Image: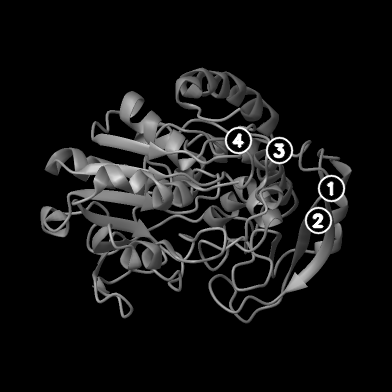
Amino acid sequence: MKLGLDLFIEEEYKQFKGKRIGLVTNLTGVNGKLVPSIDLFYEHKEIMLTALYAPEHGIRGDAKEGEKVESTTDPYTGLPVYSLYGETRKPSKEMLDDVDAIVFDLQDIGSRYYTFIYTMAYVMEACAEYGKHFIVLDRPNPVSGEKMEGNLVEEDVRSFVGLLPIPNRHGMTVAELALMYKHEFGYQCELTVVPMQGWKRAMYFDETGLFWVPPSPNTTTITMNILYTGTCLIEGTNLSEGRGTTRPFEVVGAPFINGYELTRVFNQKQIPGVIAHPTSFIPTYQKYKDEICSGLQLHVVNRDHLHSFEVGVKLLETIAEMYPNDFQFIANDANKYFFDLLAGTKTLKEHIFAKTSNEFLLSCSEQLEYFNQQKKPYLLYK
């Protein structure tokens, strides 16, 4: 199997000889032998690398979620590193003055909450505005390219965790998304995509033969990636989603929960593809730092049968019913709910409290079918 990066270095770079190249990447931008794209570009005699651009978590992936990333100088190449998760998320004219084309080489994780795919949208917007060529080096969707889950983001809750009307699990690669962004959502830049060779839509990342490099501190394993489409919703509540533990998004709990009781009730629902066991944990940061949380750990029994969005919704509904005096959706000072941004709608909260999640999940089917038809022209792999 060959990544878009491999093919660009071998052949595709030739059409951009003499062009000044900017590179949007981080520690996941590596080839099959774990050599960084930064090094490959910088050391290539016929690629003129002039600038680097850092998404959320920074160019080396060491910044925590939501942590502002500063622009800096790369110590290895001496090139400027412009932050796209600091003062601005869209490159300014000044950030693009020294480039003719921008290459995007980042590993996505297949869920719409992950901000890299929106960094891509903002860079495409800037490229269209300032006449720069945009090139996407494709990488696998780690949770396969066949399944879709969830609902489309509604207009009034668009944000950097849901900027465009795509479902929670979209089943697309970054190059396919870029094509869709251009032709469906109006990001009309000059676009070149470099597809992979040898990737099939049914593949999970552990079937590719590639090394998994976590795109951020909490994207730990393939199990975490599979569950994330559902358990990321926990972030919008007063439950711990396991940040600050070795199993983020696999363990869920809070000091007010009885893990044994929660596990028993959750397992009684017999949700296909998943089973839980009781656990306790002490987060080292974020919610309930240094406090004992009781809850459960989710285990993927059969990933082909699992719908992780359903798991997340059903788990929240169960906890809301069991702990009505303790469970909360977190609101800011303006009474806005982060959960609504993650959910892509303001109605899911109401369904969870009303115990009508089945009704909401059923309503997703029509939206998924619409998206499935919309994305078909842009799919690059079988």
Amino acid on which the number 4 mark rests in the picture = Gly
Inter-mark Cα distance, 2 to 3? 20 Å
Res. 20 image quadrant: bottom left
Residue receiving disc 3: 307
Apparent side of residue 20 relative to residue 247 in the rendered image (left or right): left
Inter-mark Cα distance, 4 to 3? 14 Å
Eye-nearest disc, 2 or 4:
4
Apparent side of residue 291 relative to residue 107 in the rendered image (left or right): right
> The C terminus lies in which quarter of the figure?
top right
Amino acid on which the number 2 mark rests in the picture = Leu
The answer to whether 216 is drawn above or below residue 234 in the figure is below
Coordinates of residue 274 in the picture (x, y in percent): 81, 46
Res. 169 image quadrant: top right
Q: Nearer the viewer, residue 317 or 309?
A: 309
Residue receiving disc 4: 145
Eye-nearest disc, 2 or 1:
1
Which type of secondary structure does the marked residue at label 2 adopt? helix
Eye-nearest disc, 2 or 3:
3
Inter-mark Cα distance, 1 to 4? 20 Å
Q: Is residue 58 visible?
A: no
Coordinates of residue 159 in the picture (x, y in percent): 36, 45
Coordinates of residue 165 in the picture (x, y in percent): 42, 31
Of pointers 2 and 4, the one earlier in the residue sequence = 4
